[in-house]
Amino acid sequence: MMKQNQNNLSVLLVVLMVLVIYVVYVIVQDDQPGELLVQSLQKELRTINEPILKSDPSVFTDKDIYHLIDIQSNEELLKQGRNIFFILTTLTNNGTIQLTPRQACAIESAARANPDWKVFPLFVFAKWFNVSSDPFIPSLLRFCNIRLRHVNLETFAVGSPVEKLFTEGALSKSSFIVEHTADVLRLLTLYKYGGTYLDTDVVVRRTLNILQPNYLGSEGSGYVANGVINLETTGYGHEFAEACLKDLALNFDGTRWAANGPFMVTRNLQKFCNTTEVVNMNRQQCGNQLTVYPPDVFYRIRYPHHDWFFYPERSVEVMKAIENDVLVHMWNKATSGIQLLVTSSAAYIQLANKFCPNVLLNTKENF
Ligand SMILES: *[C@@H]1O[C@H](CO)[C@@H](O)[C@H](O)[C@H]1NC(C)=O
Ligand SMILES: *[C@@H]1O[C@H](CO)[C@@H](O)[C@H](O)[C@H]1NC(C)=O
Ligand SMILES: *[C@@H]1O[C@H](CO)[C@@H](O)[C@H](O)[C@H]1NC(C)=O
């Protein structure tokens, strides 16, 4: 009887051990892209169960299709203020996300260098992606601080100073709809939630925590750029965002490319800092509350040297120049047409290798 029990016990132990080994095996297996990805996706995204475009329902019943959450559906998440926003206004005819390798790199680098910040790539005209075929999103979603979101232009500006720009068509009639929507949205987003806006042509190298809150950067042209902006949710930062929105509500200009971006922030800083000269807009001059950093902080390699990131023969010089910088700006408007092979030794590829390695690995030929 005793013997029989002991035998039963050993059988039970063996079964238990096998079970434990199996569970450990499964957990280790789960650390492969597929399972981890599904877990983070389930947390962050919901599967489309019903078609969102009635004209082509077949596309959206596929299990591979994920629909972005509206940023307004969970604003609690944004309340702490350590938010990094990217705004993606690329137009697609079918609403699918299409990140370029360089855009995906900006997002990965921001998330890597700032694990204590949440990174929100905000998609305006794109709402869904195919998780089985998208080259970058699966690897981006392995960072638990990246939260892909959709911005609904019909509701996002409601109650803000720029509501009418959205409802009365001025924005949608602009000659530069993509750029101007992004110009307005970055200030509106910072006004609503606070945090840091970054252009998608940056590589973030270091934590943003070393910068005192409320800042922009000059790119050396006599205007303050709007590619990097940090504004707090309250106080002076919020007041500045509000002043910019009120200005846009009155003076939005759909005919000139830079009218609602650099020109607009510069004239508002002139008022806030009580000086017409961008070089004088230091923290002391701006009420000890806001800084306009000189070009060397965010835009160190300047026009006409913007293409140095793409030429191997310039890489030593460039890498040395930016070695302590928080982030590097790549001048997409002037450089988007420059081809860059993933095998190049150009500075951009060296930076990608170090600061967005997953994206680089998933880039086939041209970065
Ligand atoms: C969506 O449109 C883009 C081009 O705008 C195309 O590359 C892509 O294959 C399309 N995807 C689907 C599922 O139709
Ligand atoms: C999603 O991508 C996979 C892999 O490329 C493809 O087989 C599938 O048809 C795609 N689904 C849709 C709805 O486009
Ligand atoms: C603004 O600057 C001018 C001249 O630099 C000075 O006279 C004036 O007092 C300043 N105003 C404020 C509000 O600081």
Image: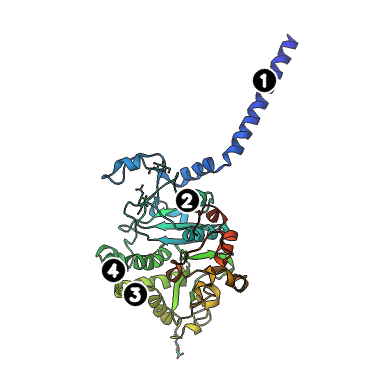
Of labels 1 and 2, the one closer to you:
2
Closest to the camera, between mark 4 and mark 1, is 4
Residue tagged by mark 4?
Answer: 174
Q: Residues within 10 Å of mark 3 (few under 14, many from 20)?
A: some
- Residue 256 is left or right of residue 276, and the answer is left
Q: Nearer the viewer, mark 2 or mark 3?
A: 2
- The mark that comes first in sequence, 4 or 1, is 1
Q: CA distance from mark 2 to mark 3?
A: 36 Å
Quarter where residue 122 is shown: bottom left
Q: CA distance from mark 3 to mark 1?
A: 74 Å
Q: Position of residue 322 (x, y in %)?
A: 59, 71
Residue indicated by mark 3:
247
- Asked whether the beta carbons under mark 4 and mark 1 sit within 8 Å of each other, the answer is no
Query: Where ligand 3 lies, by image quadrant?
Result: bottom left
Amino acid type, label 4: Ser
In x, y percent, where is residue 169? 25, 65
Residue labelled with disc 2: 137
Instruction: Pinpoint residue 177: horizontal percent, then vertical percent.
Output: 32, 66
Location of mark 1 (residue): 12
